[in-house]
Amino acid sequence: MSEERMRVVIFGAGMVGSALGQHIIEQGHDICFVESNSNTVRAIRERMDVQIVHGTAENTSALKEADIESADMILVVTNQDKTNIILTLIARSFNPKARIIARIKDVEFLDNRQLWKTGTLADTIIISPERAVVETALNILAIQQAFDVVEFLGGKVRIAGFRLEEDNMISGKRLRDVADIFPSRHVLMVGVERNGEVFIPTGESVLATGDRVFLTVPEGLNIPDIMALLGKEYRKDPKFVILGGGQIGMSIARQLEKRGKQAVVIESDPLRCQELAEALSSTVILNGDVSDAELLGRAITPDTILLAVTPSQELNFFISLLARKRGAMQVVTMMDNGAYIGMAPELGVDAILSPRLAAVGTILRFARMGRILDSAVLLSGRLNLFLVELDRGARLDGMPLREANFPKGLLMVAAVQGKQIIVPSGDLVLRAGDMALFVTLGDSQSTLMEQFITARGR
Amino acid sequence: MNFSLNIRILAVVSAILVLFKLPALALAWHMNEPVAPFTYAVILCLGVSATGFLTRRAGLEMQARDGVLAVILGWAVMIFMGALPYYFSGQMRWVDAVFESASGFTTTGSSILTDVEALPQSLLFWRSTTQWIGGMGILLLAVAILPFLGVGGAQIMKAEMPGPRKDKLAPRMAATAQLMWGIYVGLTVLCGLAYYLSGMSGLDAVHHAFTTIAIGGFSTKNASLAAYPSSVQWTAMFFMIVAGINFVMHYRLIVTRDVSVFRDEEIVWYLLLMLVAGTFCTLIAHSSTADNTLEPALRHGFFQAISLVTNTGFANVDWEVWPLYVQLLLMTIAIPGAMAGSTTGGLKMVRAVILFKVLGVVLNRLLTPERVMLVKFNGKKVPRDILDGVMAMAFAMALALLGATIFLVAVGMDVPSAYSAALTATINVGPGIGWVGPMDNFSAVPDPGKYLLVALMVFGRLEVFTVLILLLPHFWKPERILVSAGSPLRKRS
């Protein structure tokens, strides 16, 4: 590992920066934070074993101290767009080779392709929390009643989380015994969360109602079969209701239109309604207050997929609770407050859109290092997915999987040979150059994975 | 108001007419037909043009209001001067001459002639020429005047159509008009060649090219296009469709190779209406005794549908033998007409589509009062003032239609004939039903009716508002009500 140890400089140690830092440290790399707020600096010093420089963008001595010239990767994730743009320009001029990822919220800036696709910013990866959140929402909506979905290999492999409902067909049984009733051998259970505890199930694991399980959902799978298995009702033509016609609500509605689905957007500002009506075509725009009981009654029915994306996270939370109670088919809620996100699943609100977490997730995907080709986080990082390539002479190279003896907390979810995606079985033999998708319990487990895929692991 | 400039413009119009009368004069001389009708008319026209010298010092400063007046007077002078050859030939009474002339210049295509073929060739040539001139006038109207009247929204929209070229056709009005005329002349030449190659005589090909591209509908035969082989009829169908397409789109397609014009909402509805109506008429034709095989049924069905949707008014079958409800249906599909920016008459397809969308929005709003809906065309919001203009225009046309029908019934026509005559004049189609059917003519309409129809033709041709705005007392004295400089009618054109 040591040769692969990288130096990462992170500008901004706020919620996004520290979350990113945590993941990167656990992958065994070195971090240097640059932060202007002295309270944040103190908090990070107490919590994490990292280098932290107290300073601002104007402060060249701070930049020298952070040694950005020698950084392999620079993440620019302060709260301010302007600061981020300036920092990106400075960082690029100090270090032309590093991978730079910047977070920019302003949509207009993002749409100005000329600015960041050419010239100095050309090689910079720009991440927009809003875009990331819209993408997350669409992934979730693509699989009914999932509360979280991540994609790999351009959507060929998806991992989706579901809550086990009352009438499911698998709780109380050992997984080994229920394997046959799975609609296809291609569905694999990759993780379970029960009362705040997370584990990777084995054949001996027994599931219970209320567990939140993560399954692989391969391309072309019949979704209704999965729904029946989990005790959920599949509806062919759900009603999409979007509360809040802000930037995110509008983007989601537009993407739904592109997929041939008609959504209803409820927005309280009449002027914004006009703008929405102009920008969208088949979407139905209602001008009304979401706290209007009569309107809400019409909006929430058993075939409703509700997206609460108003600017007020308390309102979103509240309406989502109400919608759950009234039997909406699925509720997706936008909130950014860490405390809310923590308690929401307990109250049954588990499909959460958080611009900040979505930004973290997206940045991590771009911030992949070493032999990790792609990665994603589930349950705020308690489950991690890594797509890796097998080295020549690695332990797995030429060995049937049953002899590999994966430790607890590490599971191969899918393998890719050539263009073919394979569900791993005991007889599967992988060769160097093949790709494998692993799920690990917590980040530190990624080092475990290394022994199987690198030549030195032997 | 700049009256001397207006007079000057009339002098110019007059002089242009002289120019266009010369070919007919030459033809009369060449074919040993009486030249007197044309020489008299030319002399009179030249007399009027001479007033141009008196107004040489007229300021060139012109307001849109002057433009409106010039258009109306221009059309009146054209109709008056155009009627002279008919009148001097001794073949027509004055009222008939005016009717025939108005029908020509407004590209309507109604006729009072019981026997077209009996007219001298030179007079027939003048008759076709009037429609062709009318077509040019309409294009100029679309460029120069309509944009100021609010309903010209259709034209404004075209300029803003999504696509790689968002700018206008050409930066200046005169240049735009020249481009449109260029396309107009080009299409006419192509159409004439196609007619000639598909079996028309050279002279007839010129005649019909003039009246097809102008969407007029005058023919040199009593039986209209039915007098020609089927190849000619198919050619006519193709060029009627082409002539009904917005000229801006022709420009885009030919010059800039911009295929996105086919995604335009208006063209889609235009083609769709012809397809549906044509299929229906084919079924009707097929069930009639004469056309029980496929080719004639298709040819007759689609010809009628295309001729009426584009408002041309040619016929290749006597569709009065079809059931009366089908005839009424045919008259109805003519109301939307072809596309704005062509020489078609009627409401124009874009306005018809907008009216239906307004209806949809109103109904949906009744169902869900909170719903925010906009009337959009080609994905863009139609501004409020254009919506108002379109609705007011449709209302004015409906009123005119109703009033004229009542008037024509009062002077002795039966209801279907009166209704169809009023309709066909207002939307500049040509044939009606009953007395004025496709194989009949307007000679039996009582004289007061003929004058009314002349007025209706001009009213419809000038897109309603150009005529109605003259009725506003303040049109003549806008200073009295402090019409702001921002009003479209105060803008310098």
Image: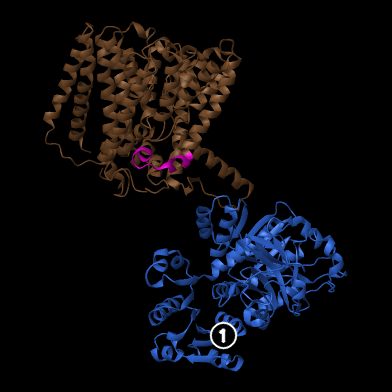
Q: Is residue A363 left or right of residue B2?
A: right
Q: Position of residue A232 (x, y in %)?
A: 79, 60
A72 over A319 or under it: above or below: below
Q: Position of residue B377 (x, y in %)?
A: 48, 44
Q: How many marks?
A: 1
Residue under pointer 1:
A29
Q: Is residue B441 left or right of residue A454?
A: left
Q: Amino acid at mark 1?
A: His
Please identify the quarter of the rendering in which residue A61 is found.
bottom left
In what quadrant of the picture does the C terminus of chain A appear?
bottom right
Determine if the magenta segment contains residue B259. yes
Query: Quick one: which chain is brown?
Result: B
Determine if the magenta segment contains residue B181. no
Q: Name the chain letter of the residue that bears numbered label 1.
A: A
Q: Colour of chain A?
A: blue
Please identify the quarter of the rendering in which residue A225 is found.
bottom right
A93 over B431 or under it: above or below: below
Q: Is residue A443 visible?
A: no
Helix, strand or loop for disc 1: loop
A191 over B329 or under it: above or below: below
In what quadrant of the picture does the N terminus of chain A appear?
bottom right
Determine the residue positioned at 25% across, 13% down: B85
Magenta span: B251-265
Determine the residue positioned at 50% across, 35% down: B269
Magenta stretch: dominant secondary structure: helix
